[in-house]
Amino acid sequence: MASEKSPSGELRELIYIDNESVNGHLSSMGVGLETGIDESSGSVEGGRARFFGNINVPGLPLGLGGEGEKYNEETEDIQKQIDITVPYRLQTLREVIETSESTIKNPDEEGVGPGDVVEVTGTVEPMSLFRFELTEDVIIRINEATNIMTDALAEIRGVSPNELAEEDQDAEEDDGNVVGNEAFLEASKKLNNKRVPIRIDTEGGNSFGALLNRKSMTVPETHAFSRPRKYTIFARVERRIGNNESWEPTDTLRLGKHFTNMTEELEDFSDDLKSAAAGHGVKMDDKHVNMDGPGKIVHPIAVYW
């Protein structure tokens, strides 16, 4: 009979998981990095077989005939390897934390501070220039699809794409918009760098900010954040934001405020962001530009639903 470990954990659809963070936290808690599990199970196969033969008894001239049955039993060991994926190690990390002196805390409880492991469930939205990225990327893709359709229509009509475009009085204005969209997208990616900001608002009225590493996304960003969605963030608290403080979500702008004398220029940039958003059809409220305290900034390990 096979002997296997019963599955544990919950069903999760991961949209983000930080492999390095999972492995690093496991190692820091004394758990080695496993790449596979060997499991063995035994199976028993048997059958009855009849036999016929003579039994030689001393003193008798002939053997004593007889027949009977015997049971043959064979045991087969089955070896099986289970590859350990990052989501598997994530569940291992959760179990290690829950069985250690640490616990996974409720983020809405008082006393949660830096270093604590939390599981935050709430409405997730992209922030600041990341909202530009998502919107501009969609617009650019639509424009590219439109160009493909225009080329196909021009071929059907037997005219050049330029001749077909001349029939559209708004073509010149559209070209200008395309250039502007591409410029905003490029600027947003440069300022956001390799990490993009999101905010999480819980039903308890608490707010959390986080920066997601682009390479750790498991689904396209435009799919994950196409609208406000309810996600769960498994994370560690980095710091608190006080009542009179705010968090600048864009990496480059935040560093600029802390390490340069361009504070006033950067404040103006933030103010202009909302105006630019309105001009490009991007919904940008105050809560998307900065996150005002009280609140917490967390280091995301995984995001799922």
Image (spheres, helix red, strand yellow):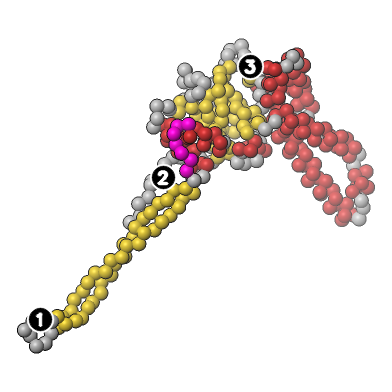
Tell me which residue sits at (48%, 31%) in the image.
28
Q: What secondary structure is found at the residue carrying circle 1? A: loop
Q: Position of residue 305 (x, y in %)?
A: 53, 37
Type of the residue with mark 1: Val
Asked if residue 270 is among those painted magenta in the image, a careful observer would answer no
Figure check: 50 above or below 289: below
For image coordinates 32% across by 62% down, the residue present is 75
Where is mark 2, residue-wise?
Answer: 7
* Residue 200 x/y as whole percent: 58, 27
- Callout 3 environment at 10 Å: few (<14), some (14 to 19), or many (20+)? some
Residue 270 on image: x %, y % = 73, 20
Tell me the residue that label 1 is attached to: 57
Q: Are marks 2 and 1 in contact (CB under 8 Å)?
A: no
Q: Amino acid at mark 2?
A: Pro
- Under circle 3, the secondary element is strand
Outermost residue, top side: 244
Give the farthest residue toward the left. Answer: 59
Residue 66's quadrant in the figure? bottom left
N-term-proximal mark, 2 vs 1: 2
Which amino acid lies under the numbered mark 3 shown in the image of this protein? Ser
Query: Reading the chain from its start, which is encountered first: label 3 or label 1?
Result: 1
- Measure how far apart labels 3 and 1 are at the Cα level: 102 Å
Q: Which of 148 and 168 lies nearest the eye of the viewer?
A: 148
Magenta part of the protein: which range?
28-34
Helix, strand or loop for the magenta stretch, by majority: loop
> Do the CB atoms of the residues marked 3 and 1 lie less than 8 Å apart?
no
* Mark 2 element type: loop
Q: Which residue is mark 3?
A: 246
Task: Check the image and report above or below for 68 versus 18.
Answer: below
Mark 1 burial class by Cα count in 10 Å: few <14, some 14-19, many 20+: few
- Residue at image position (49%, 38%) is 90
Q: Nearer the viewer, mark 2 or mark 1?
A: 1
